[in-house]
Amino acid sequence: MVNTLPCGHPGRAGSLRLCPHLAVEEPPPSTRHLTGVGTRYDLVCAECTPAALVDVCEACADRADQQSFPSGWHGEPEVLVRDRDLGGAWSTRACPVRPLNDDCLAPMPGHWLALTAEGFVRITDDDQWLVGPVELPEETYEDIRDIPDRPRRGLHTSRDGRFAAVVSDYGQFATVVDLDDWLTVLDLDRDWMDNELTRYPLAFLGDGETAKVVAATDWNRLDVFALPGGELLTDRETAAPQKDEPEPEHYLDYFQGALHPSPSERWLVTDGWAWHPVGIPLAVDLAAWLDGDRHAAEHARHLADRDDTWDTPIAWLDDNTVALQDTDGVELYDAGTGRRTGMFAGPAGRMWGHGGLLYVAAEAGLEVWDPAEGVRVGFLEGFTPIAHREGTFAELRNDQLRTWTTPR
């Protein structure tokens, strides 16, 4: 005999408990009450207390979790730590190269590229040399908020190492350089509207004959360009609405932010925001966009409402699972469905995904997390890398290049 649960349905109980008012087709708003075990929580509506919670079936629990728009937390999460010896290989050598900031060291095949006050510098295992200078236009500080250390330079490199981009993070301009021929192949301008709140949206795609760059060409628009010629591949109409007229079908009222392509470049997550303001990471079907769906970038999948949180670390764990960091830890989302698939407390700092694990450059050192269990499994005290290349992490400071490579 199958037991009937308090929600009125038979079957297995879901992974969280609810007050009875939430076990309905259209649940009211709720708050999350942490249980003290990891990040497990229950849902409670405004009329109830945790004493009223009941077990419900998996379908009712899932519907309430997805549709009751939980906001706010009660209690504290449990940070799970089970550190073990990480092994791996270390290397340290003298390297008197000084990047402009921690966003100005980027991976190249077999080596690194730094952006310094003098320009691009190539860094190998035993040498470094100046490639040449690069400049961006002066910013036009119209209607800009006075935020310290903004704008500032950032560096991006293509997978094959042929192209590099210097961007004005929290600013207006970017330029793409062909390092093989030492030519500027593309100058970009996203206008000045509230750009001091987001990093410059830019990411390289493909390599060799398929090389491309996707970047912001306005505050609310992304475009893709072929390289090295710079041909626009995404010509389309995205006009703003006229006064007292409804918004056009393909108008996007959204401030684009940092771009994060998935490993196979099927998806592109953009870390942007919308009024009033609220952080809303979007997942663009990049494959469909490049295959002829002209407005895929304007009709991206909504991953989460993050209140006033955006411009935080993001990393891909595999080609569908993206990790979004906020002040409480990390939430995992499936880019294809938009559903949250996990969450855990603890990580705080720049993130990289590699081999199914999450690597976090925390203030005290490099942390290694197992997202499947939500557990920290390793810690390298005092090592705070600023770049990653295929399992090798690099720290460049105090005139030393220090790297750690994960076990093969």
Image (cartoon, rainbow, N blue to C red):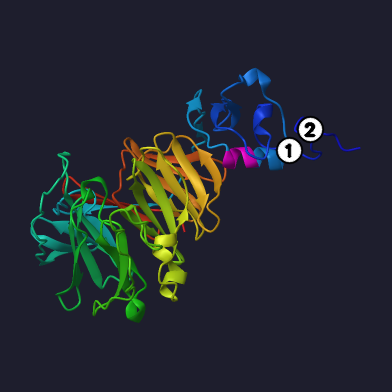
Say whether residue 300 is left or right of residue 61: left
- How many residues crowd around disc 2 within 10 Å: few (fewer than 14), some, or many (20 or more)? some
Q: Which residues are magenta?
A: 63-67
Q: Is residue 290 magenta?
A: no
Q: Secondary structure at mark 2?
A: loop
Instruction: Choose between 147 and 379: the one closer to the eye.
Output: 147
Amino acid type assigned to the residue bearing label 1 in the image? Cys
Amino acid type assigned to the residue bearing label 2 in the image? Leu
| Image x and y of residue 395, in percent | 27, 49
* Image quadrant assignment for residue 381: top left
Q: Are marks 1 and 2 in contact (CB under 8 Å)?
A: yes
Q: Is residue 18 visible?
A: no
Say whether residue 5 is left or right of residue 257: right
| Image x and y of residue 325, in percent | 41, 42
Circle number at residue 5: 2
- Earlier along the polypeptide chain: callout 1 or callout 2? 2
